[in-house]
Amino acid sequence: MAAHIVLNHLVRRRRIGRSCLLAATVASVMSAGLRIVAPSGSAFRCLFCSAGCIAKSSRGVSVVCVRVVGPPGRAKTSDGSWIMPASDTADLVRAIPGSPTADRDVLPLGKKELRRKAKVVAEERVTNLKSLDVVGELVRVMRGPRLPGREKGGVLAAPQIGTPSRLLVLEDPPGEIADLSQEERELQGRLKPVPLKAIFNPRLRPTNNRTAIFWERNPCLPGYRALVERALEVQVSGRDTEGNEVSYIARDWEARLLQQGVDMLDGLVLTDRCIMRSLRALDAKGELLPPDCPHEGPTGETSKKALSEKELDAAVQQGGSRGLLAGVPIIGRPNALLAGSLLLRLRARKVQPEQLQSAEVQGAIQDLLNEVSSGRHPFGIAAPQLGSRLRIIVTSESQEAVDKLSEGTRRSQEHTAFKPSVLINPVIRRHQGSPDACFFERSASLPGYEAVVCRPLEIDVEGLRANGELVAFTVRGWRARILQHAADILDGVLYVDRMERRSFRRDRMKDEEVPADVPIGVRPVKKQVVTRRKQTVNKQQTMKRQVPSKKQRPRGPRR
């Protein structure tokens, strides 16, 4: 006699899915030949996976491993809050080097998993043990190691550790808020901590048009932060760890964390959303923002006072940021100013003819030549990167650097060795008919990262040599790219302002695939297609211009 069960009320509410029912339980129920009928108004949960489940035996007979837990009533809704179960022994096992249960690391920027849209988690899989294990792992990775006096929160999405599922965890613990001043708490809307939450298949919808701009960080982009504009209030929906529907309104900082997490589920990272001119190293925390950057806080509520030239010069004199190893003379410290230094975002001043032989200009030229000849900057450097607000660049490419490249790279990017070359007040224009070339670039001001930048393959250059001689020449290939890269810095522009944002990655990710929508290589010039109708109109306009009007026609001799 087949085993059956009546669970109509659970089916209608979609509270039933597949279960982790043991084969022995299925066999025992079937061998007993029992007909199991559920009492009216009862709910059931699996003894093994603690969820209302239906499993199918090998004979195709529907069997349920359940126990009565009370009347179902209305479907529960929650805000996704979750309590992390204590597992001190398991944590010790995970901490053993090489342990098979060790937590995964956050993927670095450039991994293809971060650029793919995460998959929706089926409702029957939300409450199973494997999903809960991923939730626990996300929380442990987000919080980091347990240290005295340290409490870390934030948001972390499943793709950031390599799981392609729409799942995120978030938390804003009291320890994070305690480090803020009262003014910062009120401005950011962080007066109360946000408890630990885990949400499957989160969906967000802004409830109004109010937005705010605040600093954000991303564990896939360590060492950097940037300003991002986001909605102040969102309607949240999804599923919690028990399969209940999540439905509530998130505000202020919690709304920001949720939007940041959903971005990661959609294959978007910090550099896809941020105000790029605000991107900076964490060491440049005390540096002023560029004059054209929006202020921090709710948009449209307060105005930002523009700094005068004197105030900008005073800020520049502070020296900028060179990282934590700025005072170390030998151990590979960054010799160039890091992104976030105000000087890198200001337009450098033109060198006047009477200044060419001054100690300031000649000293800046010598410093640039020394940096290039030392090998720390093999392709060149601009004066602002060394702390001088002058329009001077030095470019080069040694034969040794060219020899390290593969034959294919040398040909496609057109690398040729040339000696260090000084150029003062450079003026660069696209050569007529030049196509665009899209290749990866790096900068000493953003160490450890690279991105694809599209620039003209061939350019016309004008400027002064160190002795004041005026020069004008045309150059193409990698040398043209170096010149454009350095000249941009003189205008307060870094390569990240021009890059293909989805190509930004760690520079050690050379073997990773570039997203399909990112152009690579030389792009041919698009020929202007003129339609037949347009040609006819142009011809008529030309003929009209050639035919003089009645008033302009010369009068012939009267007969």
Image (cartoon, rainbow, N blue to C red):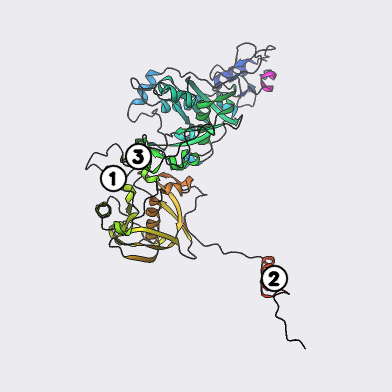
Is 10 inside the magenta-drawn segment?
Answer: yes
Range covered by the magenta-colored residues: 7-14
Residue under circle 2? 540
State the image coordinates of residue 446 (x, y, percent, origin top left). Answer: 37, 44
Q: Residue 182's spot in the image, x, y percent? A: 43, 21
Placement of 310 over or under 420, stated as above or below: above
Residue sitting at the far front: 558
**Amino acid on which the number 1 mark rests in the picture:** Asn
Task: Give the quarter of the image for residue 479.
Answer: bottom left
Q: Is residue 387 left or right of residue 42?
A: left
Quarter occupied by residue 378? bottom left
The secondary structure making up most of the magenta span is helix
Amino acid beneath label 3: Ala
Cβ atoms under marks 2 and 3 closer than 8 Å: no
- The answer to whether one can see residue 222 in this image is yes
Question: What amino acid type is highlighted by mark number 2?
Answer: Gln
- Disc 1 packing (10 Å; few <14; some 14–19; many ≥20): some
- Counting residues from the N terminus, which is met first, the one under dot 1 or under dot 3? 3
At 54% from the left and 39% from the top, the residue drawn is 117
For residue 4, side relative to residue 449 (left or right)? right
| Towards the viewer: 18 or 432 | 432
Residue 341 in sight:
no
Which corner quadrant holds the C terminus?
A: bottom right
What SS does tag 3 mark? Answer: helix
Which disc is residue 357 wearing? none
Question: Would you place residue 282 above or below residue 344 in this image?
Answer: above
Whether 527 is among the magenta residues is no
Mark 1 — residue?
A: 335
Circle 3 residue: 315
